[in-house]
């Protein structure tokens, strides 16, 4: 590996922390230095390999030697993943606290050590057309989903600038599809962030009806407005909401999506640095926030309306345990079974998408219907 690349990666690793995650540190460095696309890829590969194989590295070695060791392990794993057993992966690939908070199947541990796949979502019915235009695309298991295997900067393509597709993980696409909003309905994307799922909901509603979008951060809503403009989405209103009982509107909704803030365990394959900065305290604190979001938002759900909860995490406290707790303390709702092949063929009110199933992020989804 080029010495300059190694030293740049070492600087970014040294700058990375819980407050300054590795992906943010990379963006800052690239903004300052403006390296070539090849240089960006090489540095990113070094940084992510370091954190992916963090549990194997020799701490007494220099950072640059540890990066080289991580790259060697990366290559070894690509050639013979079966060589890495559960006995080796379980104590090294994830922090020890995870043992008591979630299942850790060998298939998931191996998926964590693999390079993540890049998923696109084409506009409705345009998947084949987009694949032909971009090249290097493989049709995914969900409608209009594509796995991109090429090297071009997708943000610079005319198709992206014209709003013909979004870069969106497959499991995130699944959330909106399972919500299945109807045309002319009124929905609330309560934790909309920068709008990835809102754009999909709008497409499914054919840009009709109304979607309220809220988030606690104004800068995220500003990004949402830029994305909706590019995509030609206009059936929404955006407003700040801090998650409290003081709701952004008194509108009653046919459906509410709470894509809640979470510990992000489901993204550990794509974001290996987060494995070593996320703590059990984060899980416990976020579970309380998630429950309060559900309780507060349900106040404006119509009788007969649908409530969907999604989190890109796999800890029981934020997923199955939380869904059961909300059902028990909030009698106005009843679990709502749902199914959609290939995600879930037998109706159930909850779904866990493991990363190894579709080479995507992990995701938990639960649904309820308001009955009173």
Image (spheres, rainbow, N blue to C red):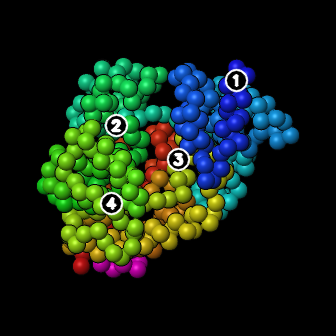
**Front-most of 104 and 212?**
212
Residue wearing tag 2:
166
Which quadrant is the N terminus positioned in? top right
Q: Earlier in the sequence, mark 3 or mark 2?
A: 2
Query: What is the CA distance from the residue labelled 4 to the residue labelled 2?
Result: 20 Å
Q: Is residue 113 above or below residue 149?
A: below
Mark 1 or mark 4: whose residue is earlier in sequence: 1
Question: Which of the two marks, 1 or 3, is nearer to us in this view?
Answer: 1
x, y percent for residue 334: 31, 72
Comparing 239 with 81, the one in front is: 239
Q: Is residue 151 above or below residue 319?
A: above
Q: Is residue 217 left or right of residue 14?
A: left
User: Mark 3 = which residue?
Assistant: 267
* Magenta span: 327-334
User: Whole-percent x and y of residue 111?
Assistant: 57, 39
User: Which quadrant does the C terminus fall into?
Assistant: bottom left
Q: Nearer the viewer, mark 2 or mark 1?
A: 1
Upstream in sequence: badge 4 or badge 3: 4
For disc 4, the marked residue is 214
Q: At x 25% / y 24%, what residue is drawn? A: 129
Side of 240 relative to 87 (left or right)? left
Question: In terms of image quadrants, where is residue 32?
Answer: top right
Picture disc at residue 4: 1
Residue that appears at 22% across and 33% down:
125
Q: Which dot, 1 or 4, sits closer to the camera? A: 1
The numbered mark, 4 or 2, whose residue comes first in the sequence reads 2
Q: CA distance from mark 1 to mark 4?
A: 43 Å
Q: How far apart are the two marked residues, 1 and 3, measured between alpha carbons?
A: 29 Å
């Amino acid at each position: 590996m080029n010495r300059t690349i190694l030293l740049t990666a070492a600087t970014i690793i040294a700058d990375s922390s819980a407050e300054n995650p590795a992906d943010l540190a990379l963006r800052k460095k690239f903004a300052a230095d403006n390296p070539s696309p090849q240089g960006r890829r090489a540095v990113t590969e070094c940084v992510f390999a370091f954190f992916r194989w963090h549990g194997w590295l020799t701490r007494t070695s220099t950072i640059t030697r540890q990066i080289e060791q991580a790259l060697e392990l990366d290559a070894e794993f690509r050639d013979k993943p079966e060589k890495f057993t559960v006995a080796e992966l379980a104590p090294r690939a994830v922090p020890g606290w995870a043992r008591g908070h979630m299942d850790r199947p060998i298939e998931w541990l191996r998926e964590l050590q693999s390079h993540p796949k890049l998923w696109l979502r084409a506009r409705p019915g345009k998947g084949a057309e987009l694949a032909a235009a971009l090249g290097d695309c493989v049709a995914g298991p969900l409608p209009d989903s594509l796995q991109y295997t090429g090297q071009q900067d997708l943000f610079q393509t005319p198709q992206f600038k014209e709003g013909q597709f979004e870069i969106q993980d497959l499991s995130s696409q699944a959330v909106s599809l399972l919500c299945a909003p109807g045309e002319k309905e009124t929905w609330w994307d309560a934790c909309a962030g920068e709008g990835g799922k809102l754009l999909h909901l709008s497409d499914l509603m054919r840009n009709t009806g109304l979607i309220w979008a809220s988030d606690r951060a104004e800068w995220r809503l500003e990004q949402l407005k830029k994305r909706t403009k590019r995509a030609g989405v206009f059936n929404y209103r955006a407003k700040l909401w801090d998650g409290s009982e003081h709701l952004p509107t008194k509108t009653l909704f046919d459906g509410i999506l709470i894509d809640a803030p979470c510990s992000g365990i489901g993204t550990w394959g794509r974001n290996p640095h987060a494995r070593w900065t996320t703590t059990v305290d984060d899980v416990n604190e976020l579970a309380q926030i998630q429950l309060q979001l559900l309780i507060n938002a349900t106040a404006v759900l119509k009788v007969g309306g649908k409530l969907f909860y999604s989190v890109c995490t796999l800890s029981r406290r934020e997923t199955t345990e939380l869904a059961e707790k909300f059902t028990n303390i909030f009698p106005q709702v009843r679990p709502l079974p749902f199914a959609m092949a290939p995600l879930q063929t037998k109706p159930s009110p909850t779904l866990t998408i493991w990363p190894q199933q579709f080479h995507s992020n992990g995701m938990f989804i639960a649904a309820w219907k308001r009955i009173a």
